[in-house]
Amino acid sequence: MRDHSKGPQGHEGDENTGAAGPPSPADGAADLAVWTGRATNRVQWLLAAAGAACLALGVELAVDSAWTSGLAPLVMAVVGCVAAGLLMLYGTLAFVHVAVRVDMEALEVRCGHIGVPRTRIPLSHVVDADFAPRVTPRQWGGWGYRWRPEKGTAVVVRRGEGFVLRLGDGRTFTVTVDDAESAVRVIRRALRLAPGRKAPA
């Protein structure tokens, strides 16, 4: 997978200083470089702590249990605590923050410290991008990686600004990220500079 921007580097200091003409798409691509942004939700650490507590309780029950009501209830309690703890830990740590990267080829979204889940959308599949001044978990039914048939797909790690990609198949992809207006400008410029594409209306 290629994960780097294309295009020539800056032109300052070039020896060829002939008459300047109108900027070409290649010049615009050089100026675009790579845009990166992120969003963080520190509240998720509280939920992660609750998950760790559930996991620790399950381990404690398994190692030092004085239950006299039988083995089956003990096993169910241990498995339940461990499973709940692991699910809460992954479900929160995976969405403590989101990192977004845009270059001339694609937009990539990585969640959490290990970058999973990860989504990569080629810009050839994107029709336009819109700024969303306020995205909330209530709109999507919760935090994290969400899907709703009437709204599309979203990565929501906090309340606040984000952007919405309109894809060629009619779907949308929403991401909460800081400085989302800059992301929209960069995406629209990349779409305009793509061969055979016109600037979105």
Image (cartoon, grey):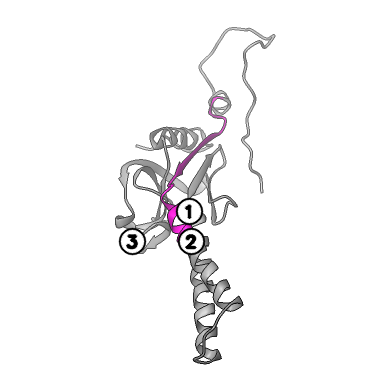
Label 2, label 3: how far apart the Cα atoms are: 15 Å
Residue denoted by label 1: 95
Counting from the top left corner in percent of width and height, residue 153 is at 41, 57
Q: Nearer the viewer, mark 1 or mark 3?
A: 1
Counting from the top left corner in percent of width and height, residue 111 is at 52, 51
Q: Which image quadrant is residue 31 in? A: top right
- Identity of the residue drawn at 38% across and 34% down: 181
- Identity of the residue drawn at 66% across and 44% down: 2
Q: Amino acid at mark 2?
A: Gly
Region in magenta: 31-51
Position of 127 relative to 11 (above/below): below
Residue denoted by label 2: 91
Rate crowding at label 3 as few (under 14), some (14 to 19) or many (20 or more) other CA atoms within 10 Å. Answer: few
Residue extending farthest to the right is 15
Could you tell which of marks 1 and 3 lies nearer the N-terminus?
A: 1
Is disc 1 placed on a helix, strand or loop? loop
Label 1, label 3: how far apart the Cα atoms are: 15 Å
Rate crowding at label 1 as few (under 14), some (14 to 19) or many (20 or more) other CA atoms within 10 Å. Answer: many
Q: Amino acid at mark 3?
A: Gly
Q: Is 104 contained in the magenta span?
A: no
Residue denoted by label 3: 141
